[in-house]
Amino acid sequence: MNEAERLTKLEERYAHLQRHSTEQDKVMLGLSEEVAKLRKEIALLRGQVTSSGPGGGEEAPDERPPHY
């Protein structure tokens, strides 16, 4: 392999790595946006759960359980 072929191969590898890096950046940006969206959704759901309390937000009427 002469020096020109070697240089051509290196340039091809470098171009491939640049393309791969650009694609990874796009994917990472998309994942970052999705994580941010999911965090907001989780915060909203946690707020709904904590505001409703363990009984669903409404107090149950003072009734005997069915096994009495």
Image: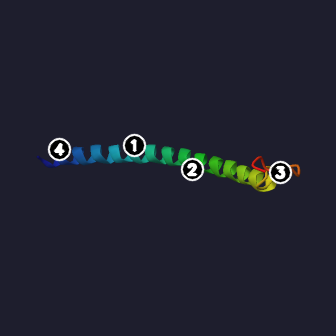
Mark 2 is surrounded, within 10 Å at the Cα level, by few (under 14), some (14 to 19) or many (20 or more) other residues, namely few
- Identify the amino acid type marked 4: Glu
Of badges 1 and 4, nearer the viewer stands 1
Marks 3 and 4, how far apart at CA: 88 Å
The x and y percentages for residue 11 are 28, 46
Residue closer to the observer: 44 or 31: 44
Of badges 3 and 4, nearer the viewer stands 3
Provide the residue designation for mark 1: 19
Disc 2 is placed on an element classified as helix
Marks 1 and 3, how far apart at CA: 69 Å
Q: Please state if 41 lies on the left or on the right of 34 as rendered.
A: right
- Identify the amino acid type marked 2: Ser
Provide the residue designation for mark 4: 5
- Identify the amino acid type marked 3: Arg
Q: Which mark is residue 32?
A: 2
Q: Please state if 58 lies on the left or on the right of 14 as rendered.
A: right
Marks 2 and 4, how far apart at CA: 40 Å
Marks 1 and 4, how far apart at CA: 21 Å
The x and y percentages for residue 21 are 41, 48
Q: Which residue is pictured at 54% across the width and 47% down the height?
A: 31
Disc 1 is placed on an element classified as helix
Provide the residue designation for mark 3: 64
Q: Which residue is pictured at 48% across the width and 48% down the height?
A: 25
